[in-house]
Image (cartoon, rainbow, N blue to C red):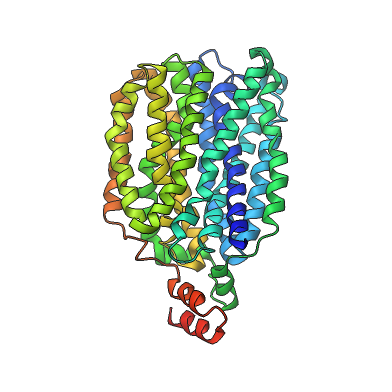
Amino acid sequence: MKKVKILLASLVGSIIEWYDFYLYGTATGLVFSSLFFPNHDPAVSILIAFATFGAGYAARPIGSIIFGHMGDRIGRKASLMLTLIGMGGSSFLIGLLPTYAQIGIVAPALLVVLRLMQGIALGGEWGGAVLLATESANKGIRGFFGSVPQLGVPIGLVLGTFSFTLISALTTEAQFMAWGWRIPFLFSIVLIVIAVWIRSGIEETPEFQRKKEQGELAKIPVVEVFKYNSKDIFRLIGLKLGDGFFNVFLMSFILVYATTYLDYSRDTALLGLTLSCAAMIVTIPLAGYLSDFIGRKIIYTGGLIAMLALAIPYFMALPVSTGWFFTMQVILLGVVWGAIFATQGTLFSELFPAKVRYTGLSLGYQIAAAIVGFGPMIWTAMGTNYGASPFAFGGFMMVGLVLSLILILFAPDTRVITKYEDDFEEEQITHPNNEAEQEKTVNLT
């Protein structure tokens, strides 16, 4: 029962964080470009709006350092409570913002500030949620446990896109643009209250607690992680870039791409995104469970190869028909990327020792996220110059995928070679009450 509560705590916060984050991504192309960044040229409005979207990604490394330091020095739980409040609070305030027509340039300025707050909070949330699950798991089930918080991405996005779809269906276009878009943002406050209540009832992770009791905490985690684990940080960044660019396209920019360049309706684009995320809810725990038997590396490598092979066919199939649009979204996002993402939390966390794990995991991941977050700006310019060219967009994706594929081939199989203290875990299972033996195992490790 205790393990179930921990998994629920890691998942519920992750759901809310990603609900808020992707709520902004959905609104960027549909609402913000016209209400907060009006311009006579729609392409310029979209470009500026996605610049603020990218700013949220750029702020995430800052959050990873702030909350990573807190998570490695004070505790995973304390850090996660603050990230939750920061993310949800900024989303709620976005729902109250007046538009450009009401207060002029101050409106987009405030929107950017709140977006930066979102990015900083999310920069600490993902790594903490992963560690809450993986550091509470025994050896042999860590892959499955690490996949559970990853479910926050598709569930959060489904909730976000569903809320926009529902409000859009219940309002006219004028009503939606006037006040309807605000409702999903304001609803964040309800979700935050629920998540804070659940997380307040959990304990600190065993591995962090053990390091704290032994006095082995890092004094300045960001300094120590670069001193002793810089290679793994750069490896993590490169591993994330390939699927990261494709992910941002599949889960955010696709709404602009489908409506602007392929003439699909907004509801069709949202439905395709929702269906693919629904498929991901099945793929993620299944791939996480499987990774405990065949390893994270095999699944990760296979996913990258599949994504590389489908890069250009995906863009060629999108304009053919609605059926092909839905099918390719489900395959590439719901199945292929879902399998890759299922392994990332566990794979990346197993590269770092406990005393700098929060910082190393979060910082590497969020630096990569900051880079891929500006993808929409690049794709907007590409669309203006080349239209919906499968070779331009597909070729762009393939460059990052090749880099990640090369790096994963030379990465360790973390199911076997890990920085988690597995000897201690095995001893706990065999002699859970033998403190002397536990201490002996820790010292040997």
Position of the C terminus by quadrant: bottom left
Q: Nearer the viewer, residue 59 or 139?
A: 139
Percent position of residue 420, x then y? 44, 67
Query: Residue drawn 69% across and 31% down?
Result: 95
Percent position of residue 164, x then y? 61, 26
Image height check: is 14 above or below 425?
A: above
Position of the N terminus by quadrant: bottom right
In this rendering, would 336 be left or right of 157?
A: left
Image height check: is 404 above or below 334?
A: below
Percent position of residue 371, x then y? 43, 41
Image height check: is 157 above or below 150?
A: above
Image height check: is 288 above or below 104?
A: below
Q: Nearer the viewer, residue 30 or 202?
A: 202
Percent position of residue 253, x then y? 46, 28
Query: Residue drawn 31% across and 52% down?
Result: 298
The answer to whether residue 29 is seen in the rendering is: yes
The answer to whether residue 219 is seen in the rendering is: no
Total marks drawn? 0
Residue furthest to the bottom: 436
Residue 263 found in image quarter: top left
Q: Nearer the viewer, residue 80 or 278?
A: 278
